[in-house]
Image: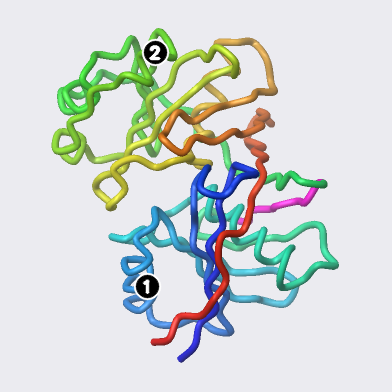
Amino acid sequence: MRIPIYQIDTFTNEQFKGNPAAVCPLEKWIEDDLMQNIASENNLSETAFFVRDDNEYKLRWFTPKGEIDLCGHATLAAAYVIFTYLDKSIMKVKFNTISGVLEVVKEENLLTMIFPSRAGEKCEAPEALIKGLGKKPKEVYKSRDYMAVFESEEDIFNLQLNIEELKKLDSFVIATAKGKEADFVSRFFAPNVGVNEDPVTGSAHCTLVPYWKKILNKNEFVAFQLSERGGKLYCADLDEKVKMAGEAVAYLEGYIYV
């Protein structure tokens, strides 16, 4: 079997920056175990698989260790592949996913996504979160992910990570603070699914944006993710939805033989 594969650097306009995702367009679904093995072999934070369904696409995301329910950068990458290689005539694509219908619109160099809002509920900081980040946050919220809020951008940049402690948690972890050049900054950790630190995490902004809307009293944001590769997102709060936009650039195109 020959499966096309693309690797796209997302939330950036430069190769070797942003968050790389693999994208595998399929004519029909293959076995889940095979998709998982491909994602593990790719060893990127996510591999996206999609199948065309009339005028829409069914989309799934796999980390090296398992399938997940929502992924921003791999959705952006899948849309980039469709717009750039598979159907250059369209400007909007819809994906049917486990988290509902996700739309991506092409607007010049930006790809804009509409995702569900996931505002967090305030909670106590688990001991493993404090030890895992190396510092007690001033506040913690919980949605799909824990969101740990710190005082400054320097706090986020200088976290002293203990990955083994973070693995004890039942959720992924966002660390965030008000930014200097951006409205807010963040980092994201998901060691339980094989991603110690994700370079740029679109889905985290489903929780970040509604929080910073309340704190900054505004609806539109520029966000930076302070990973080693870094990434920039343009976000807006749409009440029950969150808009995220970013650029993308291709790194490779080829085939998998399985």
- Where residue 252 appears, as percent x and y from the top left, is 55, 66
Q: Which residue is mark 2?
A: 154
Return the residue found at the far right.
89
Question: In screen coordinates, is 47 left or right of 219?
Answer: left
Q: Residues within 10 Å of mark 2 (few under 14, many from 20)?
A: few
- The secondary structure type at the circle numbered 2 is helix
Please give the count of numbered marks on the rendered protein: 2
Spatial separation of the CA atoms under disc 1 and disc 2: 37 Å
Q: Which residue is mark 1?
A: 38
The amino acid beneath tag 2 is Glu
- Where residue 146 appears, as percent x and y from the top left, is 34, 30
Q: Residue at x 39, y 42 (%)?
A: 198
Question: In screen coordinates, is 183 left or right of 121?
Answer: right
Note whether 84 is above or below 247 in the view shown: below
Q: Residue at x 61, y 52 (%)?
A: 76
Is 63 or 219 nearer to us in this picture?
63
Note whether 175 is above or below 137 in the view shown: below
Q: Residue at x 32, y 19 (%)?
A: 158
Q: Quadrant of the N terminus?
A: bottom left
- Is residue 4 a member of the stretch shown in magenta? no
Question: Bounds of the magenta span?
Answer: 101-107
Question: In screen coordinates, is 37 left or right of 223?
Answer: left
- Where residue 213 appears, as percent x and y from the top left, is 60, 18
The amino acid beneath tag 1 is Ile
Which numbered disc covers residue 199?
none
Q: Main secondary structure of the magenta part?
A: strand
- The secondary structure type at the circle numbered 1 is helix
- Where residue 250 appears, as percent x and y from the top left, is 61, 59
Q: Quadrant of the C terminus?
A: bottom left
